[in-house]
Amino acid sequence: MEILTKAELSKRFDEIVAKIRMGAIFIHPTDTIYGLGCSALDQAAVLKIRALKQQYHQPFSIWVPSLEWVQDNCHLSVEGKTWLGKLPGPYTVIMKLKDHHSLALAVTLGKETIGLRFPDHWFRKVVEKVKVPIITTSANKTSQPFMTRLEDLDSAIAPGVEFMIYEGEKKARPSKIINVVEGTVKER
């Protein structure tokens, strides 16, 4: 696994964007913790992340490339529009998809809803350039502590990751879950 800083990513920006589009599995920083990611359109890559995390029963959240993507691909209730107005931020907003085929089946597991992230973080520029959603799930095995620093990376996950963008230790907690379909808020 190659570890890149923000400065190194800047120098290789187009190369990294191309790798993500081609199905690379990577670890990325967010406004909260580190995420494990790949293109949310690449079924094979998403299945590899499921195997790495040993997570087979819950849909993954996605980092959307823009709020326009949400408007084009999700049903927007009044509450959903209100939460879109609060983005970017440390939230995972659960919305109903217009068409669950707009993502790889391994992302949604056939469910009609999806958790959407649009963090207030510089890595958003990479996702915008990729132009498709990326998986953003915590970079740990299911039910294990989430990754906030390099030393927390599970040795079983590292071999399945092509590269990591590392910016030092994170002091935050995972995003707050806002379910606009059910009208609930959940702290993790």
Image (cartoon, rainbow, N blue to C red):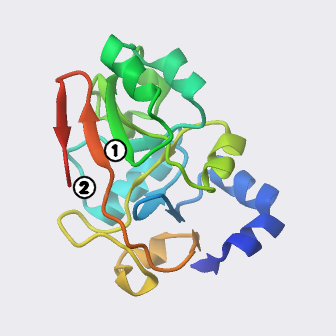
Question: Height in image: 34 above or below 22?
Answer: below
x and y percentages locating residue 45 in the rendered image: 49, 52
Q: Which one is in front, 26 or 44? A: 26
Residue at image position (41%, 57%) is 48
Residue at image position (45%, 79%) is 169
Q: Which one is in front, 144 or 71? A: 71
**Residue under label 1:** 60
The answer to which of marks 2 and 1 sits earlier in the sequence is: 2
Q: Nearer the viewer, mark 2 or mark 1?
A: 1
The residue most toward the bottom is 151
The reply to whether residue 22 is visible in this rendering is no
Q: Is residue 175 left or right of residue 188?
A: right
Disc 2 to disc 1, how far (Cα)?
9 Å
Q: Picture quarter containing residue 89? A: top left
x and y percentages locating residue 81 in the rendered image: 41, 18
Q: Is residue 109 left or right of residue 4?
A: left
Q: Secondary structure at mark 1?
A: loop
Q: Tell me, yes or no, whether the two marked residues, 2 and 1, touch with CB atoms within 8 Å.
A: yes
Question: Height in image: 81 above or below 162?
Answer: above
x and y percentages locating residue 56 in the rendered image: 23, 50
Q: Secondary structure at mark 2?
A: loop
User: Which mark is on residue 108?
Assistant: none
